[in-house]
Image (cartoon, rainbow, N blue to C red):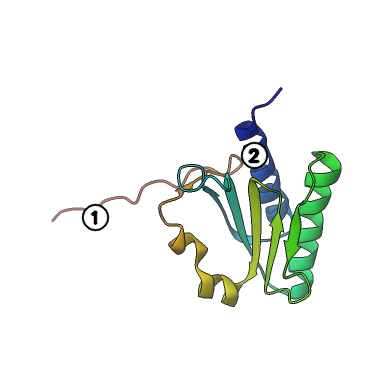
Amino acid sequence: MKSAADRSYQLAIAAARTAEENRAENIVILDMRTITPVFDYFVIGTGNSRRQLHAISEEIEHVLEDELKDKRMGIEGYQESRWILLDYGNVVIHLFDAETREFYALEDFWSEAQRVPLPWKPEEPAPAEAPKG
């Protein structure tokens, strides 16, 4: 039996991977557990069109509900399609168009949240120091 924290992590990773498989860009998972008792993780991604945002949200729903047997608690913004929010309780998925993501800047607003590395991506190396001379 998985703990609630393990389950939240599993859902966040599955949502992020599904978003990437559907060509979402700049995918970020924020660990919210030390900041608020309301959520465990935010998953944030950018789509390039209304159609793509719909496809990403629908695929995430399919994976989380049909494959992982979780139940969505709410959805916001689907009709407007500039910011679609999928609420799975401990995990909230935010799908934006580029302009809306920049405007709301959730990563800046929640800047104290730890970024969760995406397990399928190699870690970014630290920038090299400029040679002294």
Q: Is residue 101 above or below residue 123?
A: below
Nearer the observer, 59 or 37 = 37
Question: Could you say where residue 91 lies in the image, as x and y percent from the top left?
Answer: 64, 48
Image spot of residue 117 (x, y percent):
52, 43
Q: SS of the residue at dot 1?
A: loop
- Using the image, tell me which numbered label, if any, was put on residue 130: 1
Residue beneath the point at 70% across and 49% down: 15
Q: Amino acid at mark 2?
A: Ser
Q: Amino acid at mark 1?
A: Ala
Tell me which numbered mark, 2 or 1, is placed earlier along the sequence: 2
User: Helix or strand or loop: what does disc 2 sit on?
Assistant: helix
Examine the rendered structure and indicate whether residue 27 appears above or below residue 64: below
Instruction: Name the residue: 64% across, 39% down.
Output: 8
Query: What residue is shown with label 2?
Result: 8
| Direction from residue 105 to residue 127 in the image, left or right | left
Q: Residue at x 31, y 50 (%)?
A: 128
Q: Position of residue 129 (x, y in %)?
A: 26, 51
Q: Is residue 111 above or below residue 70?
A: below
Quick one: quadrant of the N terminus? top right
Q: How many marks?
A: 2
The residue that appears at 71% across and 58% down in the rendered structure is: 86
In the rendered image, the quadrant that contains the C terminus is bottom left
The circle on residue 74 is none
Neighbours of disc 1 within 10 Å: few (<14), some (14-19), many (20+): few
Q: CA distance from mark 2 to mark 1?
A: 40 Å
Mark 2 nearby-residue class (10 Å; few <14, some 14–19, many ≥20):
many
Left or right: where does residue 55 sit relative to residue 94? right
Residue found farthest to the front: 37
Residue at the limit of the structure toward the left, as seen here = 133
Instruction: Give the image quarter of residue 121.
Output: top right
Give the quarter of the image for residue 108: bottom left
